[in-house]
Amino acid sequence: MKTLQSGPGSIYDVLGIGFGPSNLALAIAIQEHNAQVPDGDRLVAGFLEKQPRFGWHRGMLIDDATMQVSFLKDLVTMRDPTSDFSFLCYLRERGRLVDFLNQKTLFPLRIEFHDYFEWAAARVDGLVQYSAEVVAVKPVTRDGEVCWFDVHSRDPDDSERLIVRRARNLCVATGMEPHLPHGTALSDRVWHTSELIPRVAELLGNGTRVRRAVVLGAGQSAAEAVDYLHRSFPGAEICSVFAKYGYTPADDSPFANRIFDPEAVDIYYHAPRDVKQSLFDYHRGTNYSVVDMELIEALSRTMYQEKVQGTQRLRMLNVSRIREVGHRGDRLDVTVEYLPTGERDVLTADLLVHATGYRPQDIGERLGEVGKLCLRDEEDALLIGRDHRVLTTPNVVSDIYLQGGTEHTHGITSTLLSHTAVRAGEIHASLIARRLTATAARSTTADGR
């Protein structure tokens, strides 16, 4: 495989790995900074994304699904309310500002917010390279110190060739990966909800008959998948399987939502380990395995209407779990166990959809040998500074920032949109401050003082 250096004199101040909403927010902060300072104070930044274009949970962009966070928690407003990258500026440019205000809602359609992300990404397009999958990150040593990182990524024009870019700092925001039960084998009939929209479109396009679909999970994605499949295949039975007795409503009450405040991150970060765990457990209901009350009521109403009409297509198999999945031709035999009695029932289905959530990607796997330079605690969790910077061995003078994968140090907001703008501002401020410190140190050394 050929390797192409990006140029001996081109060293990035920061190179982002992944370009979802988190690193997009950082790119905006850097572009706005660079527009306001002299050339010598600008940050040389770049971002690498393996997707061919910007995309955020495209597989769940259901046409009528709404966001679960306020539009004010966009890419910039919580950091700088005057930024012209805000959702309101997007609406003004799209000619929908008045129309949106007339809806009297804080929660836009998910497809609309995705379009906002694409609009913002297009405005920082010069900072990002798409179709550039990162395959390796290697430390570069000078006089015994790790001063830079060489990031190897596939050439968008030739996947057999690698391009190497050198950076003083990294910001890793590779997002979450689908979580599946152990032993799950994905196929044309077995999906994760991250594939829901294109998979359903494919079946509808080729006329495949769906008589029964099974959805495993009890969170928002599970309920949305159940509702979407029920509407998409009007002749099919949709079975929702989950271990709870019923869907748990999301706690979006004003006081509970304060766990997403910027100040709450400070409190969480500095709290003892047992207090961190308590806070996390107390407020799981704001985000994990919960469903919007409006959707719960809509599904319940649908079930009742079908019972009245005698044509029940929507079934809730509660206090249950899937024990086995067998393949019989183009159909599936899904064994469901009712937990209170142990009784098992085999459902013959055309589809099995796993709404089993996501998990953060391991930085060790993502960064390879650079991951070995990162310090960990006694439970093998990464040590992270308040500025989202990974603590490293003493010989590393370059920095690695994380956007995501820091729930153990920064709390629930680690992977959520609620803190995206603030987190990007904190990382940007840290980059500037640490560059000034390094420059001052070099100047002192050069002067012999």
Image (tube, helix red, strand yellow):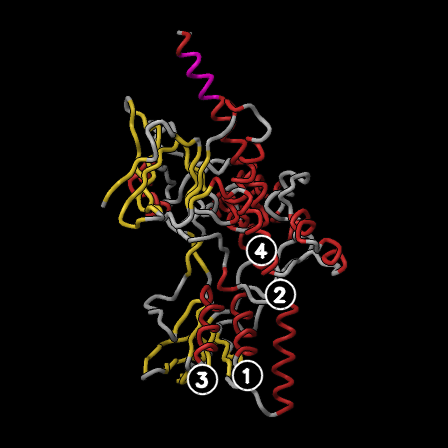
CB under 8 Å between callouts 4 and 2?
no
Q: Residues within 10 Å of mark 2 (few under 14, many from 20)?
A: some
Can you tell which of label 4 and label 2 is closer to the viewer? 4
Residue at 37 percent across and 40 percent down: it is 376
Horizontal and vertical percent position of residue 123? 56, 44
Which residue position holds label 3? 209
Q: Quadrant of residue 150?
A: top left
* Nearer to us in this view, 16 or 162: 162
Q: Which mark is residue 234?
A: 1
Which residue appears at 74% of the width and 58% of the height?
99
Q: Give me the C-alpha separation between circle 4 and circle 1.
A: 29 Å
Mark with earlier residue (3, 2): 3
Q: Which residue is mark 4?
A: 115
Label 4–label 1 contact, CB within 8 A = no
Q: Mark 4 against mark 1, which lies toward the viewer? A: 4
How far apart marks 4 and 2 lie (CA) works out to 23 Å
In terms of sequence position, does the residue under pointer 4 or pointer 2 come before the other? Answer: 4
**Mark toward the start of the polypeptide (1 vs 3):** 3
Q: Residue at x 32, y 68 (%)?
A: 183
